[in-house]
Image (cartoon, rainbow, N blue to C red):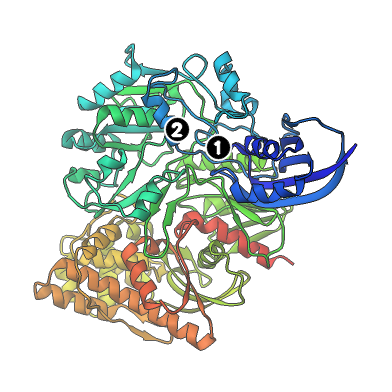
Amino acid sequence: MTLGLQIRVRGRVQGVGFRPFVFREARSIGLVGDVRNDKEGVLIHVSGKAMYDLPEMIRGSAPPLCEIHDIEVKEIEFAQSDQFRILMSGEEGAETSCPPDAAICSACIDEILQKGRRADYAFTNCTNCGPRFTIVERLPYDRERTTMREFDICEDCRAEYENPFDRRFHAQPIACPNCGPVLTIEPYAPHPLDAATSRICDGEIVAIKGLGGFHLACDATNVDVVQSLRTRKHRPSKPFALMADLETIRQFADPSDIEIGLLTAPDAPIVLLNDTTGTLPEAVAPGMSRQGWMLPYTPLHCLLVRKVGRPLIMTSGNLSDEPQLVDNDEALANLAQIADSFLLHNRPIARRVDDSVVLPTPLTPMVLRRARGQTPGTLALPASLPDRQVAAYGAELKSAICLTKHGRAMLSHHIGDLDNVLAYADFLEADQDFAKLMDHEPSLIAVDKHPGYLSSRYGRDLSEKTGLPCVEVQHHHAHMAAALGAQGWDGDVAVGIILDGLGFGDDEAFWGGEVLVGNYQSFQRVGHLAYAPLIGGDRAQREPWRNALMRLDAAGLEVDADLLFSDHPIKQVRAAAVATIQSPLSSSVGRLFDAVAACLGILPGQQSFEGEAAMRLESLASASQDDGWYGMHCKDGVIDPGQLFEKLLADRARGSPDAMIARRSHRGIAKAFSGLGRRVAEKTGVQTIALSGGCFQNRLLLTMVAEDLGDFEICGPGPVPVNDGGLAFGQAMVALAQVD
């Protein structure tokens, strides 16, 4: 026996080249011992003169994809060793973070573009890049526990895999044309990638099996094929994502250094960039001033983009409003009416994962959709919260699940809207999958207070079956907690400005324009937008004119409303309002933006996707530099937008530009809520203000509010979505804070 150290490392330390890194570092300073993966992370046994140096070396120069949460060091005695070894993994299970997928690295890009055995090989990877989360079935992360176990490693790959000085040392998805996955194309052609290239260039729509599911790809410069894709997919106006290399992106946008950093990061998200040329077809992103661009993040995408030489539409391979397809046979059957050809491969996808979406803002980059490359990463919980295992189930839209364990929260990938049967099935599967993957056994359940959300019903039913306590969290309290927690806030009291579409309020109205005072445990509502009825319930969310009619009537502008909406059934809607038939009250700022948009003639009838009118209004406002605003009265914490509509209609009657009116409306809403938030903060002595809710995806609104509150500490958009995709994270923290 010899005296040595046991070093326990927790975090994202599996599937990121960590064991090879430790092997090389230990050998470089003459240490002996071993390193292995186990259910807690990585376990190191080491001895030698310089053994006390190793923990700091690990902290200081860990691999780029690694994320260290904790290092424990203690002296032990273990069997004498004459060298340092990498051992097989220990028992199954996970107390550690599962690795996310990582975009292809520069070394692998060079390799597939040059001569050699991996030239043009679409599944090239190394320890610094490639699939992880989309192929792993259970932890610890080793090849036999991934979908790559079906492919036997050839002698050449084995030599790389076992060479500690090769960048593929213990790279679990290692492959080459002799032993790895292969491409095929339907209709058949002998060279699938070349065939796909030719067909895209000839104006075809090609369904492509990628990392976490299928995409539908076509030439983004071809007006006819882009419009054909919209027609076939029944997607009239929701923006399409674009893929190109950086040089090509610069021909259509002017990304800043920060934006380039986002594009080239290992998660390689879709980044919303200003359309600086307007030369792509309008049908790519109708009515929008920003377009969603991403770099090719797999070898397959790199090769395809290079061969086509034009920007590609790269949108989710699914039927309208359904989850992305992952199986070859299902894609061939379900996408046959959309795609002309299918570029397939035979590596199974362990779980469906969409592309992440990020919006650059003056504060920090804002994650709009947390998915590929970002999940299943974890977030540290405030130190004041107890260490319990919570399962939080989010909301109805933009569904995601959050699990807590050992002082960290794991927010799942974007699942989708649960009103779709297939998305709900994904939600149920994800709950079981993540619990198994992370060895999670909840002692507490958290749900939204809404009585009808499917996610809430599921959580309540689970609580009843298991006997576990269930905490029902008010929607906007969860938004506030998510914004605070994402920034690591751990104070006593904060102010929250929470602006969104709707959430079930404590008075059974639908809130959505709220000023709160509180913390993780509790809150008080101290201000809100004046109520207006949502005539027709869900129809009011789809038809902006209904919201405009109610707001104009409330402001005494019935005559103007009659003129603006004469071709709509205004008498019936007004009658329903009087009779309070299907007319729940709402303080929603989302619906307020819809009303403003309708007054300007932006989609007054019906939206084709959630938030379309507000997004078009923001794009219009961004075209103006006007610094005026439409003020709103505030009495006893209630903000009345009547004056805004009076001034809006007056400016429109004078022939003022719509862009100016849109911008003044934005600034008026921003000033009303920032002003109320400031007064509340100053009255209560609070220095921290949280900004959350889906309306803060509006970059212009966020910028205006943040500027108005620049002398406060702002906890706003960041790694946790401000939309309902971040709600489960907030629910988990509220539940933890409320436990006895």
Q: Nearer the viewer, residue 706 or 496?
A: 706
Disc 1 is placed on an element classified as loop
Which amino acid type corresponds to the residue marked 2 in the rendered image? Answer: Ala
Asked if residue 697 is positioned above or below residue 145 in the image, the reply reads below
The image shows a total of numbered marks equal to 2
Residue 107 is labelled as 2
Label 2 crowd (10 A; few <14 / some 14-19 / many >=20): few
Cβ atoms at labels 1 and 2 below 8 Å apart: no
Q: Nearer the viewer, residue 91 or 610?
A: 91
Which amino acid type corresponds to the residue marked 1 in the rendered image? Answer: Phe
Q: Is residue 210 visible?
A: no
Q: Position of residue 656 (x, y in %)?
A: 12, 72
Quadrant containing the C terminus in the rendered view: bottom right
Question: Which picture quadrant has residue 559?
Answer: bottom left
Quadrant containing the N terminus in the rendered view: top right
Asked if residue 601 is positioned above or below residue 282 in the image, the reply reads below
- Mark 1 = which residue? 133
Disc 2 is placed on an element classified as helix
Q: CA distance from mark 1 to mark 2?
A: 21 Å
Report the side of 574 relative to 71 (left or right). left
Question: Which picture quadrant has residue 236?
Answer: top left
Residue 360 is labelled as none
Give whichever of discs 1 and 2 has the lower sequence position: 2
Q: Position of residue 184 (x, y in %)?
A: 39, 17
Residue farthest toward the left in the current orientation of the protein: 655
Q: Nearer the viewer, residue 702 or 125?
A: 125
Q: Position of residue 42 (x, y in %)?
A: 70, 41
Q: Is residue 24 visible?
A: yes
Report the side of 291 relative to 323 (left or right). left
Q: Position of residue 581 (x, y in %)?
A: 37, 65
Asked if residue 562 is positioned above or below residue 471 in the image, the reply reads below
Residue farthest toward the top in the current orientation of the protein: 190
